[in-house]
Amino acid sequence: MGFFDNLMLSIDESVTGLFGQWNVYTSVIVTLFAGLVTYQVATRRDPDTHPFLLARQAQASPVRNEGESAIFRSQGAPHGMPLNAGLNVKDPGASKWARGRDGDLRDIWRQAVAGVQEDGPTKGATGRILTVLGTEHVVDNALDDITRQINLIGQHISDQGGNRVAIYLPNSVELIATLFACAFYNMTAIILPFDQTDDAVISMLRRSAADTVITAPGSFPFDIVVKNYPSLRQLVWVVDEGSKHMDWNEVPQGTGGSVNVSTWQEIVTENPVDAGKELPPLEGQKEPRDVTIFWQSKPGIQEEMVRFTAANLVSAVAALIFSVPTSQRIGPSDLFLPADSLANTHTLCLTLAALYSNASVAFNSVAAGAHDLAVATRGIAPTILVATPEALLKTHQETSGALKSVIARNLHWLQTRTLTQQGVMPAASLVTSWYDRLRPSIGAKPGKLRIIFTAERVGAGTPRLSSSQISDLRIYTGARIMYALTAAKVAGAAAQTGFYDYRVFDDECSHFGPPLTSTEILLRDTAEHKTTDELSKGEIIVRGPCVAGSEVALGVVGVIRDDNTLAYV
């Protein structure tokens, strides 16, 4: 017998012996093993981003000054290149290869009206501006109608001698329209935090030297303001549909008729239908004036007044747009809902970014600062949401309390493992569908939400979110969460967690990611915290074109982690 014959005989005897011992237990083991291998191969997904990109998220300067850390910048704005200062607006007829203008607020509205300019399936697409009333009534505001309001309101205030316009409104179309009206008609916009005490309102009017107020009846103490603030010259009421029949032009006795009172609706309806449909021409216009924001830290503490230039705001808007990867960028298919006050520059700049990106934007007056996201999103299905840390913590506590069963806890553990160890957002499947009924009810169509922006407000006492809580919220909502660090004199945000950074650490407060492309950050030594060759630690200093005054010390101590992300000490 040859070698080949012996080999074949040996193989035959091995196979015969194997199947001779086959039983039901062998079948079960082989079936389970085959199923496990098949599942791993079929469900395997590449990480959403390369781990190396998470290991070093910011770039440090090669040298540092004594008593300071190195200067850290975003990888998108490395040292030797200018920080992101504007929107790169291309005027009609400009060369495709020429560098565009930085732009200002007027360019944001022009882009919102013009629609998508780039070639592609969405070219010419524009977003919608929605007003949410109650639980079911949603009003679709035509962009041409808002343009008309911008022109008529701006022209009216300007004709009456208005120069510094205080906006005391909840999140609404009228607030945004007034902001753009001030930009187009060369007036200073002053955005006051809504729902304040009478003394706080009078104090803010005095400090900002406002001569005009746009507000809603029932929220503004007209009689008290007129008596205590004689510099007020103009008042425009934004009246709801049910109160139009009342006379809102009455001036309190004793004021001497010094205040010109009118209503938003009268200004718009009493003008010809064709009036105000065209925006003022771009040529020959002056640089827009500053926008004054009041940074509200804690109740009972006087708000800090900050003047942001047009350059500060557009730089922040551009950086927030750039912070989202190109494939996930805000676009015409998105519905954006600011569930935090537009008096916060983080929320305001994100809303302006959504308008510039031709996304649809929904305004809900009860959503500003809402602690219940289910109430804030009732009647609409947002894909992008700006929420307060308080609202997210409430959602986390309620959903975590509902995960009591063994099945729910194990499904949550599997999804957490997929998110944190494999680096991918958990995908919907038949196995996880049982888990869906326990998810928080956010929006009229669960599952559409894809991005949540939230922010830590320096010195404002906002509750802090840990990385494990943010990870849980990603699984509960099915949305990616970007956690930012914001401060009074920084338009937008100073730093923000990466879009694909799903890592979990043992911390009480999550890190804030790298600087945005509009900021650079360094840490300055304090009495207790000093930078060494091994560790960067000290008071956080932020510089950049989005910072009022170009540089600001935040008054809190931070540390640069091994991955070059910023965190509290």
Image: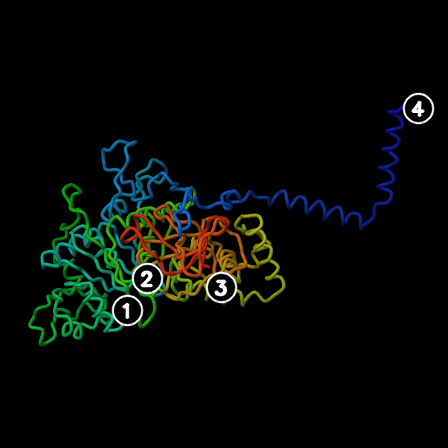
- Label 1 to label 2: alpha-carbon separation: 18 Å
Disc sitting over residue 302 in the figure: 1
Residue found 27% across the figure and 44% down from its top:
111
Mark 2, residue position:
341
N-terminal label among 3 and 2: 2
- Name the element at disc 4: loop
x%, y% of residue 148?
A: 18, 52
- Residue reaching furthest to the right: 1
Disc sitting over residue 133 in the figure: none
Disc sitting over residue 1 in the figure: 4
Crowding near the residue tagged with mark 3, few <14, some 14–19, many ≥20 C-alpha atoms within 10 Å: some
* Side of 365 relative to 233 (left or right): right
Amino acid type, callout 3: His
Q: Nearer the viewer, mark 3 or mark 1?
A: 1
- Name the element at disc 2: loop
N-terminal label among 4 and 3: 4
x%, y% of residue 467?
A: 50, 57
x%, y% of residue 268?
A: 16, 58
